[in-house]
């Protein structure tokens, strides 16, 4: 791997969702194949709480600490079992996810990897983060589709809800 490829980065947005984990795996594969550094970024939004509640600790610090812990766990879970030889960094930052990812992946040589969201037959719903990154990034963006398992589980959940609603309606009609 030459020093030029080591200077290039792959920036991947992580939320903890199944789709973001698939994006992280794909980003790791891209980093290994191209010799680039991998930067996993978790963007969190501060929760506004009532300062009069008097918990004695900053809710912002607690949220940031939880996000850092989650990112560390995710990176360990995804990459600990494999010796991939890819330099990996992690960054936890507060803000708007799409805007923040685009600001971080600000070099033309960067590659930004995000989860694409869902593509259904009747409606196409792309993740707002992916949509923002695809329209505003100055570097290439790889939008990774959700795994088929996630789509299958969501389809089963929808069918289960429909059957439950139908059973409820039938029981009311027969009563």
Image: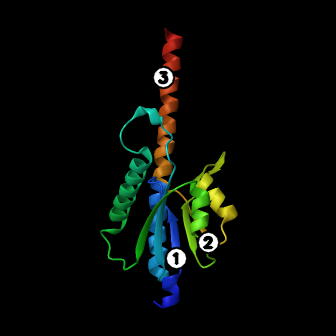
Q: Crowding near pointer 1: few (<14 within 10 Å), some, many (20+)? A: many
Q: Position of residue 22 (x, y in %)?
A: 46, 61
138 lies above or below 17? below
Report the disc number at residue 106.
2
Identify the residue shown where x is 48% and y is 15%.
171
Identify the residue shown where x is 52% and y is 37%.
158
Report the disc number at residue 167.
3
| Marker count (numbered) | 3
Q: Quadrant of residue 32?
A: bottom left
Which SS class for mark 3? helix
Which is more toward the observer, 44 or 86?
A: 44
38 lies above or below 147? below
Quadrant of the drawing holding the N terminus: bottom left
Q: Quadrant of residue 21?
A: bottom left
Disc 1 from disc 3: Cα separation: 53 Å
Residue ranking furthest to the left:
81
N-terminal label among 1 and 3? 1
Q: Position of residue 91 (x, y in %)?
A: 45, 64
N-terminal label among 3 and 2? 2
- Identify the residue under disc 1: 9
Which of the two marks, 1 or 3, is nearer to us in this view? 1
């Amino acid at each position: 791997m030459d020093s030029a490829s080591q200077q290039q980065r792959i920036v991947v947005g992580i939320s903890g969702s199944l789709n973001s984990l698939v994006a992280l795996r794909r980003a790791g594969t891209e980093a290994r194949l191209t010799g680039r550094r991998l930067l996993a970024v978790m963007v969190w939004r501060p929760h506004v709480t009532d300062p009069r509640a008097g918990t004695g600790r900053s809710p912002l610090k607690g949220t940031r600490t939880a996000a850092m812990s989650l990112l560390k766990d995710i990176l360990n879970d995804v990459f600990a079992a494999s010796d991939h030889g890819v330099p990996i960094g992690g960054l936890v930052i507060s803000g708007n996810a799409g805007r923040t990812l685009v600001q971080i992946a600000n070099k033309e040589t960067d590659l930004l990897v995000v989860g694409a969201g869902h593509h259904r037959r009747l409606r196409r719903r792309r993740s707002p983060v992916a949509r923002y990154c695809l329209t505003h990034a100055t570097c290439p963006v790889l939008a990774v589709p959700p795994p088929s398992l996630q789509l299958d589980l969501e389809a089963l959940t929808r069918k289960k809800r429909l059957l439950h609603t139908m059973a409820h309606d039938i029981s009311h009609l027969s009563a």
